[in-house]
Image (tube, rainbow, N blue to C red):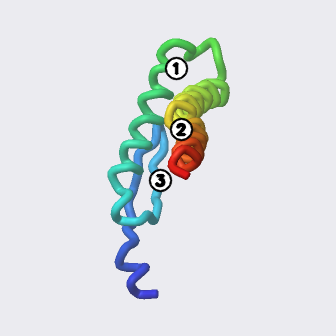
């Protein structure tokens, strides 16, 4: 239990217009700080374009959709299932040929 606490780190993140206090795994600190910066930068970009025409809530949702879309595109790009299927087929064919 004490080892778990040594691995945890208490940090404050600035996310757009909010300060957040979070407990994280020490090794993930840079990822958390980069994520907070991504959120802040994305919301700022949408705010510059839509402030006064859209509500703050709509702007936050637009930024959220933008970030989620980037995530989904990256996940799709890194999908290894098709490669695994091809490797299984090739392995079967090679094993059959070697028999």
Q: Residue at x 65, y 30 (%)?
A: 57
Q: Residue at x 54, y 35 (%)?
A: 71
- Image disc number at residue 20: 3
Residues marked 1 and 2 touching at CB (< 8 Å): no
32 vs 74, nearest the viewer: 74
68 vs 42, nearest the viewer: 68
- Image disc number at residue 83: 2
Residues marked 3 and 2 touching at CB (< 8 Å): no
Q: Which residue is mark 1?
A: 46
Q: Earlier in the sequence, mark 3 or mark 2?
A: 3
User: Does residue 79 sit above or below 3 in this rendering?
Assistant: above
Q: Residue furthest bottom?
A: 1
In this image, 53 relative to 41: left or right? right
Report, in whole angstroms, how far the alpha carbon at label 1 lies from the one at label 3.
21 Å
> At which x and y percent is residue 43?
50, 28
Q: Residue at x 35, y 65 (%)?
A: 26
Residues marked 1 and 3 touching at CB (< 8 Å): no
The quarter of the picture where residue 51 lies is: top right
Q: Secondary structure at mark 2?
A: helix
Q: Earlier in the sequence, mark 1 or mark 2?
A: 1
């Amino acid at each position: 239990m004490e080892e778990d606490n040594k691995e945890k780190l208490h940090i404050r993140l600035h996310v757009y217009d909010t300060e957040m206090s979070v407990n994280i795994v020490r090794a993930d600190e840079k990822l958390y700080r980069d994520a907070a910066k991504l959120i802040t930068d994305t919301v700022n970009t949408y705010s510059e374009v839509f402030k006064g025409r859209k509500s703050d809530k709509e702007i936050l949702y637009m930024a959220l959709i933008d970030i989620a879309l980037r995530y989904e595109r990256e996940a799709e790009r890194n999908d290894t299932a098709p490669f695994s299927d091809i490797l299984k087929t090739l392995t079967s064919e090679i094993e059959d040929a070697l028999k």
